[in-house]
Image (tube, coloured by chain):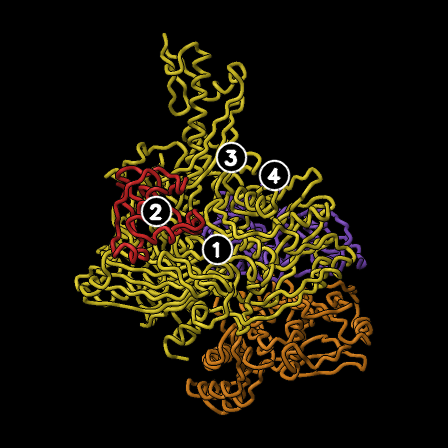
Amino acid sequence: MSKDKRSIAGTTDYQVVGTRPPRYDAPDKLTGRALFGADTNLPGMLYGKMVRSPHAHARIRSIDTHRADCYPGVYAVVTAQDFRWAEDSNADLDESAVNFRYLHENMLAQEKVLYVGHPVAAVAASSVHVAEEAAKLVEVQYDVLPAVTDVRAATEPGAPLLHEQMMTQSLSKPSQMPSNIASHIQLVKGDPSQGFAQADVIVEREFTTSTVHQGYIEPHACTAWWGLDDNLTVWTTTQGAFGMRDKLAKLLDHPMSSIRVIPTEVGGAFGGKLPIFIFLEAVAGLLSRKANRPVKMTMTRAEVFLATNPTSGAYMKAKVGVTREGRITAAQAELYFEAGAYPGSHIIGYSGFAAGFMFAPYDIPHGQIDAYDVVVNKPRTAAYRAPGVTQANFPAEQVIDELAVHLGMDPITFRLKNVAREGTGLIDGASHGSIGAEEVLRAAQSSAHYSTPLSGPYRGRGVAQGYWGNWGARSSCTISVNGDGTVSLVSGSVDLSGTRTTVAMQAAEVLGISLDRIKSSVGDTDSIGYTEASGGSRTTFATGIAAITAARDVIAQMRGRAALWWGVQDQDVTFDRGIFTAHQGGDLQMIFAEVAGKLSETGGAVTGVGNVDPQGWGGAFGTHIADVQVDPETGKVDILRYTVVQDVGKAIHPSYVEGQMQGGAVQGIGWGLYEGYQYNTQGDMINPGFLDYKIPTMPDVPMIETVMVEVPGPNHPYGVRGVGEVPIVPPPAALANAICRAIGVRVTGLPMTPARILEAMGVI
Amino acid sequence: MAAVWISSLMRDLTAGQDRVRVSGATVAEVIDGLEAIHPGVKERLLVKGQLAPGIMVSVDDKRALRGLQEQVGGESDVRFLPLMAGG
Amino acid sequence: MAAKIRVCAKINGEGVEFLCEPRQSLLECLRDILGLTGSKEGCNDGNCGACSVLLNGRVVNSCLVLGVEIDGQEVTTVEGLADWRGLHPLQQAFLDNAALQCGYCIPGILIASKALLDREPSPSEERIRTWLAGNLCRCTGYDKIVRAVQDAAARLTQARQEVNR
Amino acid sequence: MRAFEYIAPTTVGEAVTILAGKGDRVRPLAGGTDLIVQLRRSILDVDLIVDIKKIPELNAITYRPGEGLTLGAAVPCHRIVEDADIVRVYPGLVDAAALIGGTAIKGRATVGGNLCNAAPSGDSIPAMIVLGAICTIMGPEGVRSVPVERFCTGPGKTVLGVDELLVSIHFPPPVAHSGACYLRFIPRHEMDIAVAGVGASVVLNAEGTTIAMARVALGAVGPTPLYVEAAGAALRGKAPSEESFSEAARLAQEGARPITDVRGTEAQRRHLVGVLTRRALRGAVERAKGGTANGR
C-alpha cells in the first residue's frame, strides 16, 4: 500500500475519465424503445401465473390440478413434483452458499409453505386473465400451523419451528436442540470487559428495524422458450445472467450450454434481482417445455412484496464505552437478523457485512459482536444495497452520537477522534486497507451545509458515518476493432447504474480514442465469458479492469500489426494517447484508426480479451448530514436540507456517481421515515402495495447535495472505488440523530413514523 | 509454520488462544495439524470431508479459491470465515 | 372467450383500431395488443405512475382506464414524444442532465412533465415535485429529474421567445 | 380480473333503465380509480359496467351566484380544481379535490365517485358535509335528494339503491362572512390516504367577532365520514378563539370512533382529530374574514 494515497492514480490529466458523456442506453429509455423484463413478446406466447399459499406456515397435504388442467385456455400446469427431488447438495456456484434443497423448496413448495405467497404450483394459459382464473382452480389442502413473524419471538423456546431438524450452526460446540436460529457468529477483538472497565461514560440501548423491500418499480418478469432443439432461452430482468444460467442448469438438470440467458434492461434491482433464489425463470422454462410454447411470467406488485426477497428486519443491542477525553475504549453488540423462510441473512460476509462493518468507521481497541441468523415466516431475505449494514449502522451511529452529546463534543469532532485509518484492525481480525474515513469526515465538517447554522424550534441537525467494503469478483470483456477504427465492446455486466458507459470510458482512456468511437453493449451468456452479477458496488471496478485488460490486449496486437506494416520489430513500436510511433530511420506514425484500416492486410481481425478476478479492492466511507423540522403536534418530519459526503476513489463519470449518492440517500430516507412490512397476528402482511408500503415521493425530499472526496482506491489504474452501496447506510441514523436534536428524545425503532415520534415525545 | 486465526467461538478448543502456529503445505494439511494439537477442530470446520456450508478460508487476506487444496506458505496467515457476499 | 369490443382512437397522432375485452386496461391494450411497450406496469393500482399517458391532453394512469373507454379519444404515450426533428426538449434535457438511471419510471415522468409544461411554462421546484408526486422513482432520489424538468422549461420558454421574435 | 360487459349510455334515463333489475351485478363507472382496483382484486364482481361519462348532466359544472354550484357526479377532480368560480367561491371543496391521489388520479377520479365509494377516509366527503351539500339521486321512481352527511351508511355502503344513480351534488350559495376548510394528516407529502381528516365551516357576524353558525365533519375515524353536530353547536355565539376551537376539538374527539389499522393507531387518530379540528377552524375563520364570501 503506498503511503501517499494521492499519487496512486499516476497521471491525473485524463482524456475521458472524469468527463460526463451521455449514457449509451438513455435514448432508448427516453423514447420507450428500451426492452425490460416484461417487454419480450413471441408468437404463440402463453402467460404463466403462480398458485401461492394463503397461509404463513402450513403443511401441504395434497395438490389437485385436475380442474385447472382441463380449464379452457390452459396449456400446462406444474408443481414441485415436476422438478428432480433436490438432495441437500450445496451450491457455492457464485457468490453465496445456497443449499439447493432450499432453492427448490422456495421456488415451488414441497412439504411445507413457510410464508404467505409461497409458490405451490403454476399454470400457463392463453391470457394472463385466463391464467389467473385457472390458478384459482388448483385445489391445495393445507394443515395450517402457527406462524412466527417477529425475530425475537422466533428465538424463544416453544416458538413454531420452520425447519424441524435445523440446528444452530456455529464454530462453537454443535447444539443438540432444533431451533429457528440458523447460525450464530461471534467476532472478538481484545478484551471487551477490560475495555468497558476503562470507560468513563457508557451508553447501551436496544433498537429494532422493520423488514423493508428494495422497492424497484419494475416487478420481476421473464419470458422462457424451451424449443424442440432442447435449448432453453430466457429473457429476464436480472442482475446476473450467468448466475441465473448456472442455477437454471442445476434446477432443470440441463447442460449450461443448452441454456441461454439474455439479460433485458433492469427496472431497478438494488440487490433484489441477484440470481441467488430463482423466482420465475425455472418454472416458466418447465411450463414452456410442457406446453411446447413460449411462456411469459410476470409478478403483480403484491407478489413482489409478498413473495420475492425483502431485506432483514432486526432486533439489536449496542453498547459503547468512551473516556472523558472522547476516546472509545470498547464496543459490544448483539444482532438478531430475520433470514426469512430459509437461512441466509447478511449478518456476516466474506469481508464484513452487518457484524463486520457495524463499527468499521472507528479504531476500537476492545470489541465483541454476536450475530444471529433467525428464520421467520416471511419471504427469504436478500441484499438491499450494502446488505445488513444499514440495519447495524442505525444502533451504532445513534449510540456514538449520544456519547458525543454526553461529552459536549461536536459529533464530527468526536468521530474524528476515533476515526479508522489504514491498518486499523476491525472487530473481526481483518484490518483496513487504503481508506478515506478521515478525509470524508473532514470534508463534511468543512462543507457549506455543516458551516451554515441551523436555528428554530423543533429543528435538528444529525450526522452519521457509514462504510461498505465493496467487491471485486470475476468479470469478462471483449473489444473487437472495426476497419474504420471504431470498436465494439461487449461485457458480461448487466448495466444497473450506467456501467455500459463507465466501462467503455475506461477502455477509451487506454485506447486513446474518443468515447463515441466505442459501441458498448451487455452480452448474454452465449456471447461473453463468465461474469459475476452486478452488485457489491463492483462493476465499474472489476469490469472496468476487464475492459482495461482487453484494451491493453488490443493495443499489444495493434502494435504488432503496425510493426508488420512498417517492417520493424514489435518492440520498436510505442503507443501513447492513440498514436503508434516507430523511430526506425525517420519517424513513422499512425493513429489508431489508420492501423485499424490495415488489419485485413496484416492478419485479420483484432479482438482484445479481458477475463479477470481482481483482488484488493478498496472499501468506501460516507458521511451524511440531515437537517429536519418536526411538527410537535403531529410528529411529521420534514427534511430541510440533506448532504452526502462520500469517498468515491476516482469518479469515472461524476454524474452517475452523484446519482448513486442521491438515489442511495433517498432509499435510506425511505427506510428511516416511511417504509416497513406490517403484519397482523396471523402472519399476513397487510400493506403489500405502494399505497401503504410508502416509498419516498418527489415532495418528500429536498435536493440531495453531494460532495465527492477522491481518495484513490487501491489496485485500479485510475483509483476506482465502489460507490453504489455506501450511500444507503447512514440515512436512518443521520435522521434519528437529527430528530433527537429536534425533539430531545431518541427514536430507536424504524420506521420513525409520525405515530412513533408522538409516542417517543409522550404526546400519545 | 503457518499462523491460523482461531475464531472466538472455537477458542474453547484451543484453551483461549486466538492464534496457533501449524505446519502444512495446504489448507487441508493445516487443519489436520490443528486437529492433532486441538482435537475437535476438524468436526467444526468440515462436513463430509468438505468445508462446512457457509464457511470459507482466506490465506494472507485473499479468499482461497481452491479451498482445502489451496497452497499455504511458511509464514502465511490462515483464517476461517463465514461466507456470504454480493449486495 | 369474452366478447371483444371494437375501439377506434387516435394514438400518438395516428388513427388506430383494435379489438379488446372490456376487462383489458388501456395499459394492457397499448402493450399487448398495439405493441407499444414504452408505458410500464409498476403496480396496476394507480400508485406508481409508471403507466402514465396523456388522454385528451390530461395525464392519467393507463392501468386505471379501460381500453374500451378511449373509443373516439386521443392518447399520447412516450413513443409519441420524439418526432422527425429528434428528441422532445424534455427528453433532451433528461439526457443532458443525466436525469435517469434504470429508466423504468421515465416514460411516465416524461408524460406527466409534458402535461405540466403544456400548462405552466416555468413551474417552481415545489410545483414540479407536487405535480410529479404520483410518479415514483427508486433509483435517482429525484434531484436530477427536477433539475431536468426546470431545464426543459427554460429551453421551451426560450424556443417560444425565438419563434415570437 | 373476471370478464364483464361494458355499455356507455348517453342519457340519465337510459342509465337508470340499464341499472334496473340487475341487483349488485351491475355498477356505474365514472373515473374508475377505485372501481377498477376493486374489480382487479376481486373485492367486487360484476357482469356489466355502465360508463356514465357520456351523460351530459353528469359532466356539467353550473354555478349561479344566487343558486350555488351544481356539480355533475362524473366531473373529474382536475376540472374542479381548475374552475375559476369553484376556486373563488368554494375553496373548502378545492382543498379536498386537490388532495385526492396524485395528478394522474385527479385526471380521472370524480367527487361523485369518491362519495359513492364511501370510504371512511374519502377526502371530499367531510368538505362536502361542512359545505351543506345535497345529493341528487335518480332512480326508477324518479328523483330524490339526500344531504351528504346521510349519504354514507357504512364502509363502502351508501343509501343508493342497486338501481339508483347519483346524478349531481348541489352546494348552496355561501352566506356572507362564511368560510370553509378541509385538512388531513398523512405521513408523506402526497399520495397517501388520510390517517385522519377534518372539514370545518363557520359563519361569522359582520364584525367577525362571534361565530353565528359552524359545522365540523371528520374523515377516517369512524365507519363512515362523521358529521359531529355537537362540535359545531358548541361554537354558536362564541368568539372565534383558541379556547372555543379547543372546546369544539374536544367534542370532535368525543364524536370520533377511530380504530387501529394499517395507516394509523387509535390513539394517534384521536389526537389528530383534536389538532386538525383546531387548524381547520382557524382556516375557516381566516377565509370567513377574508372577504365577502369565502374570498381568500
Q: Position of residue A86 (x, y in %)?
A: 57, 52
Q: Same chain for marks 4 and 2?
A: no
Q: Measuring 65% from the left and 47% from the top, which residue is drawn there?
A: A285
Three-letter code, disc 3: Gly
Q: Position of residue A377 (x, y in %)?
A: 52, 65
Q: Same chain for marks 1 and 4?
A: no
Chain whose colour in the figure is orange: D
Which chain contains the residue that carries disc 4? C
Q: Same chain for marks 4 and 3?
A: no
Q: Chain A takes which shade in the image?
A: yellow
Dot 4 corresponds to which residue?
C85
**Which mark is on residue A382?**
1
Q: CA distance from mark 1 to mark 4?
A: 45 Å
Q: Earlier in the sequence, mark 3 or mark 2?
A: 3
Q: Nearer the viewer, residue A638 or C150?
A: A638
- Mark 4, secondary structure of its residue: loop
Chain whose colour in the figure is purple: C
Which chain contains the residue that carries disc 2? A
- Mark 1, secondary structure of its residue: loop
Quadrant location, the N terminus of chain A = top left
Q: Earlier in the sequence, mark 1 or mark 2?
A: 1
- Mark 3, secondary structure of its residue: loop
Q: Chain B takes which shade in the image?
A: red
**Which mark is on residue C138?**
none
Determine whether label 1 and label 2 are within 8 Å by CB: no
Nearer mark to the viewer, of 4 and 3: 3
Which chain contains the residue that carries disc 1? A
Task: Name the image quarter holding residue A105.
Answer: bottom right
Three-letter code, disc 1: Ala
Three-letter code, disc 2: Gly
Q: Position of residue B32 (x, y in %)?
A: 34, 45
Q: CA distance from mark 3 to mark 1?
A: 26 Å
